[in-house]
Image (spheres, rainbow, N blue to C red):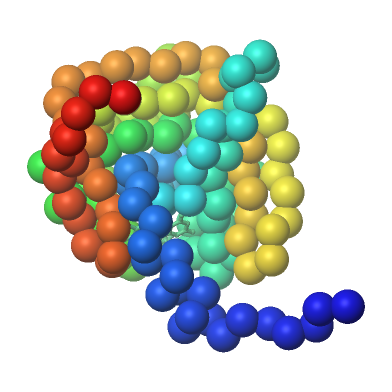
Amino acid sequence: MLTETISPDLFRAALSHWASGVTVVTTRDAAGQSHGFTASAFSSVSLDPALVLVCLDNKANCFDAFDQSEGFVIHLLAQGQQELAGRFASKGADKFAGTGVTLSAAGQPVLPGALARLECRTERRIPGGDHLILIGEVHDAHEGEGEPLVYFQRGFHELTAVGQG
Ligand SMILES: Cc1cc2nc3c(=O)[nH]c(=O)nc-3n(C[C@H](O)[C@H](O)[C@H](O)COP(=O)(O)O)c2cc1C
């Protein structure tokens, strides 16, 4: 039986070689306060029903808001939105100040300028180690314009095409 565990540094270093998009995930609590965090731990899960997931650190300030929320919005960030990604990855201060945030029909915070956004009902929450896996059923989606913001080796990058898939 394998009982070894990997060091957090090695785990992080190995994962830094994985390129991903960047999302900002938002929700509103019962008191009407908006919350959000930057997340690269995002994936589609199922086509029918339309399910996606995002993983949230148990220690995040916004944890309770997402743990109790009935829904959330996942914004897929566009090239040029690295300042927004940095802002929603930081603690304190009002992250939404000056962002032009509006509310969706479902009453969730929507940020302008994303490449796409997925409006979700919270379908399930699954504990996953030191993170909470939020599974959302996508009830509405909107597409924007532009190219994706890419996260790779702890930095933001732009996508370059090398040929047709
Ligand atoms: C590119 C990037 C990706 C991140 N991905 C995640 C993620 O998938 N899940 C997560 O919980 N935190 C992630 N973080 C860290 C959170 O955005 C950050 O800890 C945030 O401040 C948490 O929100 P809080 O202010 O409510 O604590 C990421 C940060 C960056 C810069």
Residue 2: % across, % down: 81, 78
Q: Is residue 164 visible?
A: yes
Count the numbered circles shown. 0
Residue 152: % across, % down: 28, 58
Residue 8: % across, % down: 53, 81
Q: Residue furthest left?
A: 80
Q: Residue furthest right?
A: 1
> 11 or 1: which is nearer to us?
1
Seen at 47% across and 24% down, the residue is: 119
Residue 100 position (above or below residue 36): above
Residue 37: % across, % down: 39, 52
Seen at 47% across and 83% down, the residue is: 9
Rendering quarter of residue 159: top left
- Position of the C terminus by quadrant: top left
Seen at 49% across and 19% down, the residue is: 106
> 62 or 16: which is nearer to us?
16
Left or right: 57 in relation to 46 = left
Q: Is residue 100 visible?
A: no
Rendering quarter of residue 108: top left
Left or right: 26 in relation to 30 = left
Residue 158 position (above or below residue 109): below
> 56 or 47: which is nearer to us?
47
- Position of the N terminus by quadrant: bottom right
> 120 or 9: which is nearer to us?
9
Quarter of image, ligand 1: bottom left
